[in-house]
Image: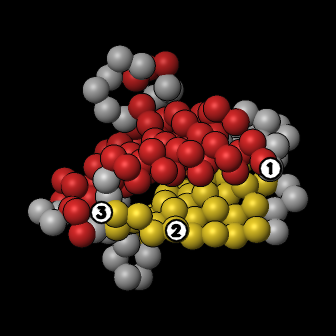
Amino acid sequence: MYEMTIQCVATEEAIDFCDLLAEQIARFFSVQDCDMFVLSVHEAVINSVEAIKTLRKDAAKKTFLLSLRVTKEDVTVTVVDEGDGIPSKQLERMGEESLEDLLLAESGRGLLLIKEVMDEIWLERQENGKCAIAMRMRRGRNGSSDIHS
């Protein structure tokens, strides 16, 4: 098993760095659908950076955490930030709409994409007030998605 957590300032450069890291992890550990795995991590990181920038005037000083855990069976990614979490209206929409319904929408596609692509997704509000989105993809194949909150 491998585990790593990195702390990044909420910047465009951090998004690019996390994309590169996700790509290398996915390729090295033989995640079958590498491109969709990377896109899911990208969407989670972008949502985190946008939440930080929207809520914090001093976003340049605010950070998020990207954690990766690799086992023989799967790769789990968690993104934690100090945003307000995902609005309940958006969570409801995830259960009612498909990615196809939102292809041309201005927002909301990222979470639905993650739900469609990853084997499992769950959301957590931590005791310290931070919000986390976690997702898991099996190594070597991609199955159906479940969401827990």
Q: Which element type, helix, strand or loop, lies under badge 1?
A: loop
Within 10 Å of disc 2 (Cα), the crowding (few <14, some 14-19, many 20+) is: few
Query: Helix, strand or loop at disc 3?
Result: loop
Asked whether disc 2 touches disc 1, contact meaning CB atoms under 8 Å apart, the reply is: no
Residue that carries the numbered disc 3 in the rendered image: 83
- Name the residue rendered at 40%, 23% in the picture: 102
Residue 61: % across, % down = 24, 69
* Residue displayed at 70% across by 36% down: 34
**In this rendering, position of residue 8 left or right of residue 121:** left
Among the 4 quarters of the image, the one containing residue 130? bottom left
Distance CA(mark 2)–CA(mark 1): 19 Å
Please tell me which residue lies in front, 56 or 94.
56
Q: Residue furthest left?
A: 57
| Residue type highlighted by circle 3 | Gly
> Would you call the spot at circle 1 few (<14 residues within 10 Å), some (14-19), or many (20 or more)?
some
Residue 28 vs residue 115: left or right?
right
Q: Is residue 9 above or below residue 87?
A: below
Q: Position of residue 80 (x, y in %)?
A: 44, 65
Q: Residue at x 55, y 36 (%)?
A: 39
**Alpha-carbon span between mark 2 and mark 3:** 18 Å
Q: Position of residue 32 (x, y in %)?
A: 79, 36
Q: Earlier in the sequence, mark 1 or mark 3?
A: 1
Query: Which residue lies under the disc numbered 2?
Result: 6
Q: Earlier in the sequence, mark 2 or mark 3?
A: 2
Residue at image coords 40%, 53%:
14
Label 1 to label 3, Cα distance in Å?
31 Å
User: What label sits on residue 112 in the rendered view?
Assistant: none
Q: What's the mark number on residue 29?
A: 1
> Height in image: 57 above or below 46?
below
Residue 147 or 44: which is nearer the viewer?
Answer: 44
Disc nearest the viewer among 2 and 3: 2
